[in-house]
Amino acid sequence: MKYKFRLFAACVCMAISSAATVRGTYYLKPMVDDYFVPLIGQSGIDTGLLSTIGAFLQGEESPLWGAVKLMLLMAIAYTISMIAALIEEQLMVSIGNKMLLDLRKELYGRILRQPLSAVESKPAGALMSSFTNDMDGLGNMLRRSLPYMVNGTVTCVAIFITMLRVHVRLALVTLFTVLMIIPILNWLAKKSMKHTAKSQVSLMELNSIAGEYLQSQEFIRISGMENQVYEKYADSNKKLFENTFSAGVFSNGIFSVTNGINQLGYAIVLMAGATMALMGAAQIGTVALIAQYYSQFYKPLTDMTKQISNILSALAGAERIFNVMDVPLEEDDGKRILDLASAKGQIVMENITFGYNHDKEVLKGVNLDIHAGEKVAVLGTTGAGKTTLISLLNRLYEIWDGTLKFDGIPMKDINKKSLRKAIVTVSQDTHLFTGTVADNLRFGKSDATDDELWEAARLVGADFFISHLPKGMETMVCEGSDNLSQGERQLLSITRAAVANAPVLILDEATSSIDTYTEKKINEALDMLMKGRTVLVIAHRLTTVQNADKIVVMDKGRIVEMGSSAELIQKKGYYYRLINA
């Protein structure tokens, strides 16, 4: 266990703090019985503090000097308890923060290694909630609530054992007051847990809705859907309020009930103690000590009840975190590592069958041979299966049946990371991450030099606009930043592909977001980039595919035609109808 030494030290400090508190309080009994009670009814005795100190300095006896010594011992015990508690709190904060650090790393690492289908099946807001709200709740439990519960339990046990040694019957009276509250607390805790879990789910749903709508502001406004979106958000927010309110009612009820029974119990203990003292069955000091122990007993109990709702909320969050972490990792049985310097980029698909759901095939018996250095364009209507081909080539999903080969090697035998290094994709959706332009260009090749970045930029015609940015390659950019136009963002995406220098290049409508003038320049640069590489172009526009070596036409998951543009036009089939539509 990584934290065993600090956890052991925290437990030792916790035990010392509880023992010192119990021992310090115990001095109250002899103080009362041995020094104060004997003075009751006596006259002419100076009990002032200054008189007591003066008598001590003159070497004279004072009737309260023994009580002062006991008070000093009590102060020392409480000081030791305070220091031990401070050390224990610091250790628990350190352990809690370190556990959260490791847990966040583990959670993010597992998400990166889980199958893409598992990650995409969860709303982005739900995943973000695991990193934020759920982690924060778990952190508060580890740093505060859990230490309170453990420390409170140890203190209560230590106090009760001491009470039994001091006076059994008064200890049992105290136990009776505690037993009165347990059934009520149990009922309130169950109700609080139920509504706390609902409030956490409502918060996750609210975050998902807010995230989706904030990312779609332009579409919402041009669609005139502001009112509808606001109403949906307001409904979700109201649901969160109702669940949070109900959870708060029951969690606060726990504290109120505990506090009320505490006052009643204190009166019962004092009454029982006074009765026993009058009957001679208990000394006054014993009654005073039991009453003080009772207050100290109920303080940690009250503190623990305050933490119940936090713990319940944290446990619900922890369950969601571990549900994410328990998803099986992406399997990779491939052992072959590709040599990128010698890789040719030949791709063969033999009778490929695949579907995202087991009850629906997306690709049906696809056969395709892409020669090394060949430019192949895949054309078809939306839903024909074009983009699915890209996902299968990168092994983001595993085929149901058939064989995929890269340079004659079955792809299932190739290590996924190695395979993905050999294939670079430029999609119609640009992806820029918070950092400098250089950081983004190195995203596919982290060890690329500055010279390699500028060489790639010149190749695709991005060097001019990069050099005119405020800080050139060191200019900060991020997803959604407004310091770059959509065309410039796409240029950076294409430049990043050039930096990666992979043997296989996939273009998924890479120039669809660029104006006609810029598209012409980029197409010229792409012609240079594509030389000596295998290129797979996923296209919707016919102008993008006409200069391909081979055109593959897909419809409903099948390849319906294949050949050059001239050959397919001559056939007057599906392709011919598309270009004349």
Image (cartoon, helix red, strand yellow):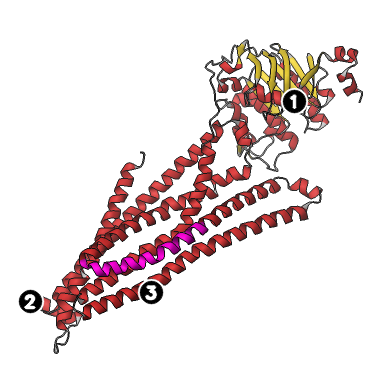
What secondary structure is found at the residue carrying circle 2?
loop
Report how far apart the C-alphas of labels 1 and 2 lie in the structure: 102 Å
Give, as a three-letter code, the residue at label 1.
Gly
Q: Give the range drawn in magenta.
A: 166-192
Counting from the top left corner in percent of width and height, residue 394 is at: 63, 23
**Outermost bottom residue:** 43
| Amino acid beneath label 3 | Leu
> Horizontal placement of 497 versus 138: left or right?
right
**Residue 327 x, y percent position in the rendering:** 54, 35
Q: Do the residues labelled 1 and 2 touch (CB within 8 Å)?
A: no
Q: How far apart are marks 3 and 1 (CA)?
A: 73 Å
Can I make out residue 33 in this image? yes
Judging by the rendered image, the residue that carries numbered circle 3 is 264
From the image, tell me which residue sits under label 1.
Answer: 385
Please report the residue visible at 46 percent of the width from the left and 69 percent of the height from the top.
Answer: 256
Quarter holding the C terminus is top right
